[in-house]
Structures are given as structure tokens and as C-alpha cells.
Amino acid sequence: MKSLLGKLGVILIGLAIFGYVGCSSSPKYWMKADYDPYIYQRDESFCQQRGRLGAQKSISAKEIYEQCMYTLGYFHTKEKGKWAGIEFGEVWKYYFSHGTYLAYYDAGNITRPSEDIVKVWVRWNLSKKFVEEFVREHGKKFENLNYIKQSVEVSCFEKKTHSLSMATYNNEGILIFSSIRPLEWSLVIPELENNSLYKEVCKKKGGEPLTH
């Protein structure tokens, strides 16, 4: 975990320098990296109340409730660890778990600028433990850090990945800071998150691996 904190710290600090009644859901249908039953009940109650108070003819209590849950960092899924909810055209699919975060990629918005390169958005839902450790090392500016989104390119032939941009968000889905400074290419390593992403997105239409 220390190496991950250090790596993310270097990235974040470097980039900062440079640059509804009846809508209740069972916890198994809503997931979050730092899932806690008490926090979940509090958040769901808050979102249900927002739904009831904000419902209009054009927007239902259910729609407000679900959008509220998404904003707080939850994903809606019928099977934990599989498909996540749809938000603003995003279709997040789980691909990696580190213990301090859950990683998803936007399966609905994958582009291929060339035969070799795949471009995709990824999202890391950070655990409470990770955030606490990160704040101790990098300051209170990050005490409400909740998740990170990155635009990533994957070289399927050379088995490399790199980040094109990064944005960090707090517990309410509000942007903390962002950068469009690309990072260096990194080799895919079997034990790391980038290998799981590589295996997910570097496929032909029939599901076979995309190789040179």
C-alpha cells in the first residue's frame, strides 16, 4: 500500500504543480469501495429524502435518488463486482481490486485511434483506509478524496499503458483538481492493475486477444 500511496502522491502533487418512497435498494445492489453498512444507510436515507423533496412532474423521485447515489460514489449493479450503473452515458465495468480501491473502465465509450491503441476512461473508487493514509502523507487538502478518473491509452501490441489526463473528486462528486499532462508509458505487469485493463480492452470483436 505504501508504494501505491507514494506513486499516487507523486502523480497528484506533480500534476497539481504543473499544471422517493418505494425506491429503497438492498445494499447488494449498490456498491462502493469503502462500503460500510452504517454509512450506506445514512447515504441512502439522505438520497431518498432528496428524491421525495425534489420530485417534479418531469423528474421522478427514483431518478433523483439514483443520481444522488451516483454522486456520492456508489454504483448500481445486480451482481457485485460486475456491471456498474449507467451515468451520463457511462457504463462502468469492474476489472480490478487492490484492497484499497476498486477499478472500473467505461465499457460504453472505448475508442481505437489506431489498430494498436485503445483509449478508455477508468475510475478508481478509493477506500476510506487509503484516503486516511494519503491525507497523513500529503495533507488535509485530500481529506474528502473519494475517487479518481483517468483517460488512459493502452498499446495492445507493445503491452504498455499510460495516462493522458487525471481528475480527482470528493465525496459529493465535486472536482478537486484535474490535469491533462500525459504520463510516461509503463509496461503491463501481470500483478498490477494495468494488466487487468489490458486484458479487458485489447480484444477483437470475437473476444480473442488483439495481438500483433
Image (tube, rainbow, N blue to C red):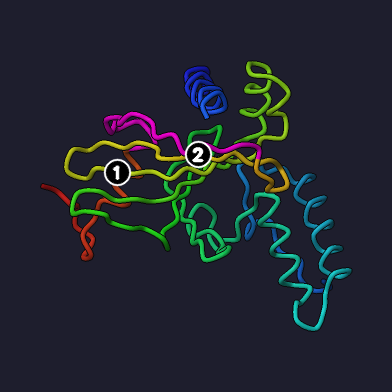
Count of labels shown?
Answer: 2
| Residue 178 lies in the magenta-colored region | yes
Q: Is residue 63 left or right of residue 53?
A: left
Return the residue at label 2: 166
Going by the picture, which residue comes out furthest to the front? Answer: 19
Kind of element beneath mark 2: strand
- Specify the quadrant of the image occupied by residue 62: bottom right
Q: Residues within 10 Å of mark 1 (few under 14, many from 20)?
A: many
Amino acid type indicated by mark 2: Met
Q: Residue 63's spot in the image, x, y percent?
A: 71, 71
Residue 21 within the segment the image draws in magenta: no
> Looking at the image, which residue is at 67% across and 33% down?
128
Q: Who is closer to the viewer here, 126 or 112?
A: 112
List the single residue furthest toward the right. Answer: 53
Which residue is found at the position 75% from the left and 68% from the top?
A: 64
Image-based side of 110 in relation to 122, left or right: left
Look at the image and give the residue range highlighted in magenta: 176-194
Label disc, if present, on residue 154 of the rendered structure:
1
The residue furthest left is 212
Rendered position, 155 above or below 208: above
